[in-house]
Image (cartoon, coloured by chain):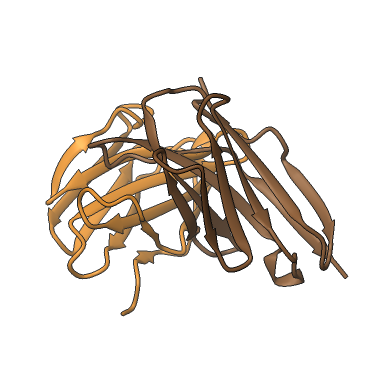
């Protein structure tokens, strides 16, 4: 199994630009999670989906952030417009619904200048 | 408000000794707890978990202890090895909820 796949691994962009992060969950998993890791706040849950439906987006910081899951094998996290304070590592994770163990991708390191 | 707290940002332990990583939580509705391990440039990987109906769970060199009355859990690694050097995250979840609430992590360094 390839595990959770994220792309790109690194993204450097200028303030005001649109950024799209991509995730392919493990085949068969039906829950998908987007996290952001910062030094100050650790791993923050941004949003999660069950069976492609957004369940809880209370962690999404602002309207500039949006996430979609058009099918069971693909999700995107979009930031528009991006700001320097969005610089962080963004992780995607997947699991089976109602199980606690989540499998994380390698992350996307985002730098907004 | 941090519901899961790891108050020690770093810990340094000699190889062969015991490493003890601590975690405190505030929400009494949490009933399942996990530890994740993270190497640089990789995503966190699941290490060990414990349900609130237990007070101890052991897996090889790793043991997690849960003290519900104190809302405290700890991870013991015995004996510690240089390959254990990583960031360790504590996480908690409430029943019927898929969300995990993570702490800020503790960086463990095991030196020879």
Chain in brown, by letter, is: B
Return the residue nearer the eye: A4 or A15: A4
Return the residue nearer the eye: A74 or B23: B23
Residue appearing at x 22%, y 37% in the figure: B96
Left or right of B57 on screen, residue A49: left
Left or right of B63 on screen, residue A106: left
Residue appearing at x 49%, y 60% in the figure: B43
Chain A palette colour: orange
Counting from the top left corner in percent of width and height, residue B16 is at: 82, 67
Q: Indicate the quadrant containing the C terminus of chain B: top left, top right, bottom left or bottom right.
A: bottom right
Left or right of A26 on screen, residue B84: right
Counting from the top left corner in percent of width and height, residue A92 is at: 36, 54
Q: Do we see residue A110 in this rendering?
A: no
Q: Do we see residue B107 in this rendering?
A: yes
Left or right of A22 on screen, residue B59: right
Residue appearing at x 58%, y 68% in the figure: B60
């Amino acid at each position: 199994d390839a595990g959770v796949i994220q792309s790109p691994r690194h993204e450097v962009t200028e303030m005001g630009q649109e950024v799209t992060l991509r995730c392919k969950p493990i085949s068969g998993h039906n829950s998908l999670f987007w996290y952001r890791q910062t030094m100050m706040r650790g791993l923050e849950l941004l949003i999660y989906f069950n069976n492609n439906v957004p369940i809880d987006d209370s962690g999404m910081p602002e309207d500039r952030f949006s996430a979609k899951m058009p099918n069971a094998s693909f999700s995107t996290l979009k930031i528009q417009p991006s700001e320097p304070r969005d610089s962080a590592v963004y992780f995607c994770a997947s699991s089976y619904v109602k199980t606690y163990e989540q499998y994380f991708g390698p992350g996307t390191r985002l730098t907004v200048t | 408000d941090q519901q899961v707290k790891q108050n020690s940002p770093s810990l340094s332990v000699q190889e062969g000794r015991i490493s003890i990583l601590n975690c405190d939580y505030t929400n009494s509705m949490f009933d399942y707890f996990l530890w994740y391990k993270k190497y640089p440039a990789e995503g966190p990987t699941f290490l060990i978990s414990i349900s609130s109906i237990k007070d101890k769970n052991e897996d090889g060199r790793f043991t997690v202890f849960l003290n519900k009355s104190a809302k405290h859990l700890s991870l013991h690694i015995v004996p510690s090895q240089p390959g254990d050097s990583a960031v360790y995250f504590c996480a908690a979840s409430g029943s019927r909820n898929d969300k995990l609430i993570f702490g800020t992590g503790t960086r463990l360094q095991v030196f020879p």
